[in-house]
Amino acid sequence: MISIKGVVSPLLLFKNSNNNFNFTKIVNNLNRYYSTTTTTTTTTIGNKENNGKKSIKIYKSTTNNALFNIATEDWLFKEFDLNKQTLYLWRNSPTVVIGRYQNPYKECHLQRMEEDNVVLARRYSGGGAVYHDLGNTNFTFLSPTADYSKDRNTNIIINSLSSIGISGPIEASGRNDIIVQGKKVSGSAYKQSGPRSFHHGTIMINVNLDSLQKYLNPNKDKLKSKGITSVISRVLNMKTILPTMNHEMVCDSVIKEFCKMYGNDNVEVEELTVSDLERIPSLKETYETLQKWDWRYGNSPEFEHQFEKRFDWGTVDINMNVTKSIIDKVKIYSDSLNPTMIEVLSNNLLGMKYNEEGISIAIERTKTC
């Protein structure tokens, strides 16, 4: 067995320089090792187009399971009736949702999320990272491309906010946002695939703004990414100007304005929940994909992570290249008097997942060499 005196300190770098992993237990394990070996219910909508009215369908999720809700949105996009305008309303328990091509290690504080049981979800569409909780209502408009209108959808949301008593001005801003009193209260993104289009967005009622800052702040390391960098905008919780505002009130208002826009009244709402996975195989398949580590983390763009620290026994400069969340290149520079340890650790990190489990395995292998 080689002596790897000093290995504990460089590994502390993973904890000290990167909030994504919690290596406290691992480091303690190493210390112990070396101290002994060295000094719902569903209602089908039966609305038919008549008298010049447009046929519509409305869905509402009754669960706060973010992965189910995002899977449902994707399932609806693939399968919604192209003869109808469709509305889907939903909200999530605390979740960070990243875009399809984003790097969660850059966009999120993953260690804080793990400690607080905040879910990481990756959606199929692009765009930036967003924080959801129960103070946030999500809407999705699904339309045949030939009859898709972003402006019409935006007006439905603006009218719904006005009808419940939000004091203005309420207006669209730029390409994606709705602002109230000069601050952002809703952001949107869009997707089109052949004859199918959707417009989805958020409505901020009483989002925990401290959590938004806590989980979405990017890492401060020298973490260089080829993905998209999110920017946290100035936002407003509308409950501060309308204390009675809540999710159900917003949903009812959006449904009312949606029906009014298309000339329909008394359209029933189909409620969806996790139990529907068993009766809808294609929805279940999408849900299972969204749960997988390979999708949430492994689908990340290639990035590099470099960090350096000086100890009383020498300097360690660790450089890693990560592709699809797998460490595929490692170079460790050090003036340590124990070069064998540096070489062994470098080799053991290769091919490991860029997470706590992967680093733990690499350390265990280094200990037994």
Image (cartoon, rainbow, N blue to C red):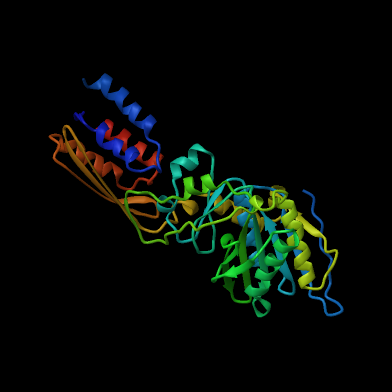
Query: Looking at this view, is 315 or 360 the one in front?
Result: 315
Which quadrant does the C terminus fall into? Answer: top left
Query: Looking at this view, is 252 or 10 the one in front?
Result: 252
Residue at x 50% of width, y 63% of height: 127
Name the quadrant containing residue 355.
top left
Residue at x 56% of width, y 48% of height: 95
Residue at x 18% of width, y 40% of height: 315
Q: Could you say where residue 178 lies in the image, as x and y percent from the top left? A: 60, 65
Name the quadrant containing residue 333.
top left
For residue 368, say whether it is visible: no
For residue 97, say whether it is visible: yes
162 is higher (above) or lower (below) than 247 = below
**Is 183 displayed left or right of 110 in the figure?**
right
39 is higher (above) or lower (below) than 348 = above
68 is higher (above) or lower (below) than 81 = above
**Is 219 displayed left or right of 250 in the figure?**
left
Q: Could you say where residue 107 lies in the image, as x and y percent from the top left? A: 43, 53
Q: Could you say where residue 366 lies in the image, as x and y percent from the top left? A: 27, 35
The number of numbered badges drawn on the structure is: 0
Query: Looking at this view, is 107 or 279 the one in front?
Result: 107
**Is 340 displayed left or right of 157 in the figure?**
left
Which quadrant does the N terminus fall into? Answer: top left
